[in-house]
Amino acid sequence: MLNQKWSPWSSSALCHKAKELIMAVRTYPSYWMYKDARGEWRWSYEASNAKTIAVSSEGYQKRSDCERSIEIMKSSHSSPVWFPTELASAY
């Protein structure tokens, strides 16, 4: 018998389904924004294999500040890479 009180749009069912859809649609590489235990916005960057390879070094009070830090990271793709001179010939 069909449960007429249950609806796929009920709050718990909708929340669960929304989470499934978000995870199903996400592509890699990509950034992931979230709130940490202190309620601050942070981001992580996952590579094409879905492994985290970078994280924000600080939490942000405002989502817009977190988004701005992602934009800064995106625009730094041509920045030079530096390392100590004693590692110049290291492999």
Image (cartoon, helix red, strand yellow):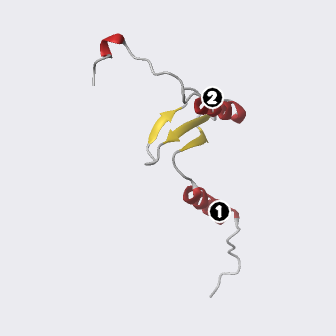
Q: Which residue is mark 1?
A: 12
Look at the numbered disc 2 and give the secondary structure of its residue: helix
Q: Is 75 on the left or on the right of 49, as rendered? A: right
Which image quarter holds the C terminus? top left
Q: What's the residue type where badge 1 is placed?
A: Ser
Residue at 46%, 47% in the rendered image: 48
Looking at the image, the residue that sits furthest to the bottom is 1
Mark 1 surroundings: few (<14), some (14-19) or many (≥20) residues within 10 A: few
Up the image or down, 4 lies above or below 61; here it is below
Q: Is 74 on the left or on the right of 50, as rendered? A: right
In this rendered view, identify the residue nearer to me: 80 or 37.
80
The picture places residue 28, in percent across and down from the top left corner, at 51, 49
Which image quarter holds the N terminus? bottom right
Residue at 69%, 62% in the rendered image: 11
The picture places residue 9, in percent across and down from the top left corner, at 71, 68
Q: CA distance from mark 2 to mark 1?
A: 36 Å
The quarter holding residue 35 reads top right
Q: Which residue is mark 2?
A: 72
Q: What's the residue type where badge 2 is placed?
A: Ile
Mark 2 surroundings: few (<14), some (14-19) or many (≥20) residues within 10 A: few
Residue at 69%, 73% in the rendered image: 7
Circles 2 and 1 in contact, beta carbons < 8 Å: no
Marks 2 and 1, the one that precedes in the sequence: 1
Q: Nearer the viewer, mark 2 or mark 1?
A: 2
The quarter holding residue 42 reads top right
The picture places residue 27, in percent across and down from the top left corner, at 54, 52
The picture places residue 80, in percent across and down from the top left corner, at 49, 21
Look at the numbered disc 1 and give the secondary structure of its residue: helix
The quarter holding residue 89 reads top left
